[in-house]
Image (tube, rainbow, N blue to C red):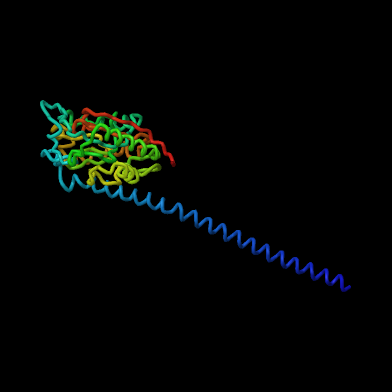
Amino acid sequence: MTGRTATFNCWNRYKKVAFIWFISAFCFYVLFQMLLHNSSNTLSSPSSDSSNLNTERRSKLYDKMARDLDEHGAAFLKHGETSQSLTIWDIFTLKDGSVTPVLKPATPPVRANVLYLNSEFSVPIADAVKNIFNPYFDKAIWFQNSSMYHFSMFHASHHIVPVPATKEEIEAEASSVQTVAARICPLNIVLDRVVLTSTGVLLGGWQVISGTDPITIRARLKNVLPHAPEKQLYDAAILHTTFARLLGPPRASSTELKTSDELQFFHELVNRLNSQIRGFKAVVSELWYVEEHDVLALALNGKMNIHKFKLGCSRD
């Protein structure tokens, strides 16, 4: 009887110890999963927060650009400045209703880094822009060449602050940019809206769905191009491309002008375009290092030398 009691007591102690171990193991597992989940959230949250902040920053920029026409009027009708401190008639001539770009040598050449929008995506946009604006402006409008749609990222030298470079230095810059391109992931983007500025520039402001953010791209380019002008031409967050430039008033025969003022007419055309292409999605997969031998060569079909680099998304 004593032996049975001892065995029974030992069995009870074993069950208690096993139960305690089981509870301890279970609690440890639950705690480990909670820590793992929290750690995962901590790692992913900053990236998500940063992306949201960049999106919001771009939205505010586009809001400001959209208000520009109402706040400053149609300055392009009065020979106003462009977005790069040049007057319209510094870069265009309008004779007998025909628009011709004024190609001026850039000395030294402007060295621009731009993301390129492939014709697969640019042509449908260009067609929509022409269909809506051409009937009212005839030849008093300059349409951006759809094969040169681009997003300006960073200048190693621009016309406001020229930075001379030898052939060897230019080759070194291009090589550095190629290294940056290898680390940039292709951008999946969506057209946030089209706006018309007071200087007559019709442009699209885009948002990034996925891929490397423009702020990161510009920071990396700045890092490998230390001699570049400190003051760049655009906000670090912006992702925009020019579709066209209005150079004069719409034709007086336009029926819309009989019932609305000029600004309202411009807004109506922009609204029509937005209704067609707002939300348009595209993929950007090339970074170009461009030597512009003419001022604004990318915009005016001028002389340039283009170094094209595929975005590689390398982690190295």
Q: Nearer the viewer, residue 164 or 280?
A: 164
Q: Nearer the viewer, residue 129 or 144?
A: 144
Kindly indicate the quadrant of the structure image that contains residue 222.
top left
120 to the left or right of 130: right
Please tell me whether residue 11 is drawn above or below residue 228 in the rendered image.
below
The location of residue 288, given as percent across then percent down, is: 31, 34
Residue drawn 72% across and 64% down? 18
Kindly indicate the quadrant of the structure image that contains residue 298.
top left
Q: Nearer the viewer, residue 164 or 285?
A: 164
Instruction: Quadrant for the C terminus, please.
Output: top left
Q: Nearer the viewer, residue 20 or 109?
A: 109
The location of residue 2, given as percent across then percent down, is: 87, 74
Residue reaching furthest bottom? 2
* Total numbered labels: 0
Instruction: Quadrant for the N terminus, please.
Output: bottom right
Residue reaching furthest right? 1
The location of residue 69, given as percent across then percent down, is: 19, 44
Residue drawn 80% across and 71% down? 9
The location of residue 204, given as percent across then percent down, is: 28, 39
Kindly indicate the quadrant of the structure image that contains residue 8.
bottom right
Please tell me whether residue 235 is drawn above or below residue 14 in the rendered image.
above
Residue drawn 25% across and 31% down? 167
